[in-house]
Image (spheres, helix red, strand yellow):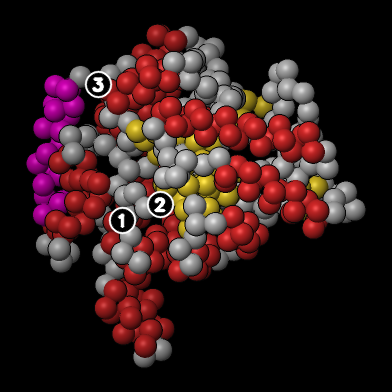
């Protein structure tokens, strides 16, 4: 489904007067507001191909209807999001859930929607039909060389698909680890995994990056072979300059200081990408900004400060992706909310008074430092994000337009009520 241009313009026209009032009010208090709006308009967040369907838990899954039945329909859904918010201009594919049958045609379709292909994602955490060796006890860490080789070959195949689509990075998340004490020799598991990653690294094209994602626990509950940022950094440091650590917000133990992790990885030039979601307890995969918006702000504050300190391009030097699941919401509405939360938080980080913050830090004025950060965090910048969308050709209120156009009902009519997106 596509939103007709005149419908979008009508929507914007109906909200324009009130938007102008709100924008002018907030813009008057922000020095260099044009620069902030431009940065917001340029910022793009990739949508993973597995986020378009209703997610589930190990207890059950409740389909919402109208889910995309194939890769083409997933691209259409992301194209729709991008048309509404102009900030979702990339898709991240998961192999083998979304193997393109005709890469050239898929690339053309994505381009028609203004989408590019972000990082490719491999999967050695499940067994696929017809697979020779099982990953029940791990993939790259496995005690059997044949199983490790199968996992290496899969990752190299994912790189090949990515090359055809114009992607330039591979994200490796391993579920490898152990459930019980004594099950694994930690050192051997690490060495096996490193050797496997080295073979995958050797297969990367010259301009590609590999992201090594870590996770503290689950599906393994005693140890994880890439369990935290230290272990990931150990792998990526040993691998070489094309290897980076990837931070997923939900992959830490409770109350971890993620902003500090981000700051230090950036300092080392080893932060490669970021997966957005939110959580109350663990890897809950909830809507970005729905539970701990201040933490998200503190992370973005370090991201902006750290990227600027290294002269990095906010839009393309790091990989930005949403990695969430939508168990009780319409996935497209959830994604609109997530992208909006990211844009607002990015805006808040952009307006932090860095000079004042540095002065406060240098004079040990903790009260002033907190005031500087919370001034930005408590600023309502929704009109800035809306202005960026408006200028880029998007909708002033994407969610309202999505609802008034009854997009989900149209998708159910078109695709059926009982469709299931591949991989779910
Ligand atoms: Mn992730």
The residue beneath circle 3 is: 3
The answer to whether mark 2 and mark 1 are in CB contact below 8 A is: no
The residue beneath circle 2 is: 318
User: In this picture, is 127 found above or below 87?
Assistant: above
Left/right of residue 14 with respect to residue 87 in the rendered view:
left
Query: Between disc 3 and disc 1, whose residue precedes?
Result: 3
Left/right of residue 136 with respect to residue 211 in the rendered view:
right
The circle on residue 107 is none
Mark 2 residue crowding within 10 angstroms, few (<14) / some (14–19) / many (20+):
some
Identity of the residue drawn at 11% across and 62% down: 28
Residue reaching furthest to the right: 182
Query: Between disc 2 and disc 3, whose residue precedes?
Result: 3
Query: Between disc 2 and disc 1, whose residue precedes?
Result: 1
Residue 347 can be seen in this image: yes
Q: Nearer the viewer, residue 72 or 9?
A: 72
Identity of the residue drawn at 22% across and 34% down: 395
The answer to whether mark 2 and mark 3 are in CB contact below 8 A is: no
Q: Which residues are magenta?
A: 5-24
Q: Nearer the viewer, residue 368 or 77?
A: 77
**The C terminus is located in which quarter?**
top right
Residue 209 percent across, percent down from the top left:
48, 47
Instruction: Find the distance from the CA under tag 2 to the CA under tag 3.
Output: 30 Å
Mark 3 residue crowding within 10 angstroms, few (<14) / some (14–19) / many (20+):
some
Residue 392 percent across, percent down from the top left:
18, 39
SS at mark 1 in the image: loop
The residue beneath circle 1 is: 313
**The N terminus is located in which quarter?**
top left
Residue 327 can be seen in this image: no
Residue 42 percent across, percent down from the top left:
25, 46
- Tell me if residue 282 is in the magenta stretch: no
Residue 204 percent across, percent down from the top left:
51, 42
């Amino acid at each position: 489904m596509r939103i007709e241009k005149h419908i979008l313009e009508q929507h914007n026209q109906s909200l324009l007067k009130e938007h102008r009032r709100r924008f002018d009010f907030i813009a008057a208090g922000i020095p260099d507001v044009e620069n902030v709006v431009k940065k917001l308009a340029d910022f793009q967040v990739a949508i993973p191909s597995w986020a378009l369907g209703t997610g589930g838990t190990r207890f059950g899954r409740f389909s919402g209807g109208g889910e995309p039945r194939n890769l083409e329909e997933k691209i259409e859904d992301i194209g729709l999001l991008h048309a509404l918010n102009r900030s979702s201009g990339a898709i991240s594919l998961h192999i083998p859930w979304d193997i393109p049958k005709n890469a050239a045609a898929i690339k053309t379709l994505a381009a028609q929607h203004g989408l590019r292909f972000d990082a490719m994602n491999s999967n050695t955490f499940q067994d696929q039909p017809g697979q020779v060796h099982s990953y029940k006890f791990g993939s790259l860490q496995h005690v059997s060389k044949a199983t490790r080789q199968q996992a290496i070959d899969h990752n190299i195949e994912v790189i090949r698909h990515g090359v055809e689509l114009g992607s330039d990075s591979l994200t490796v998340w391993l579920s490898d680890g152990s459930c019980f004490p004594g099950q694994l020799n930690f050192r051997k598991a690490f060495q096996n995994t490193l050797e496997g990653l080295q073979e995958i690294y050797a297969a990367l094209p010259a301009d590609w990056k590999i992201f090594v994602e870590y996770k503290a626990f689950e599906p393994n509950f005693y140890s994880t072979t890439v369990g935290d940022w230290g272990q990931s950094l150990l792998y990526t440091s040993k691998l070489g300059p094309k290897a980076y650590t990837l931070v997923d917000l939900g992959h830490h133990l409770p109350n971890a200081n993620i902003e500090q992790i981000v700051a230090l990885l950036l300092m080392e030039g080893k932060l490669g990408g970021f997966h957005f979601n939110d959580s109350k307890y663990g890897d809950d995969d909830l809507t970005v900004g729905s539970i701990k918006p201040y933490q998200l702000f503190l992370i973005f504050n370090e991201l902006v400060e750290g990227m600027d300190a290294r002269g990095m391009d906010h839009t393309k030097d790091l990989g930005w992706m949403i990695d969430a699941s939508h168990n009780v919401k319409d996935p497209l509405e959830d994604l609109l909310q997530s992208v909006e939360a990211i844009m607002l938080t990015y805006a808040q980080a952009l307006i932090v008074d860095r000079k004042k913050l540095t002065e406060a830090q240098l004079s040990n004025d903790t009260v002033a430092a907190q005031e500087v950060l919370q001034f930005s965090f408590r600023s309502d910048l929704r009109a800035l994000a809306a202005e960026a969308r408006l200028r880029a050709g998007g909708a002033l209120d994407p969610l309202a337009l999505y609802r008034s156009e009854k997009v989900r009902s149209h998708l159910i009519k078109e695709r059926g009520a009982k469709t299931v997106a591949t991989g779910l």
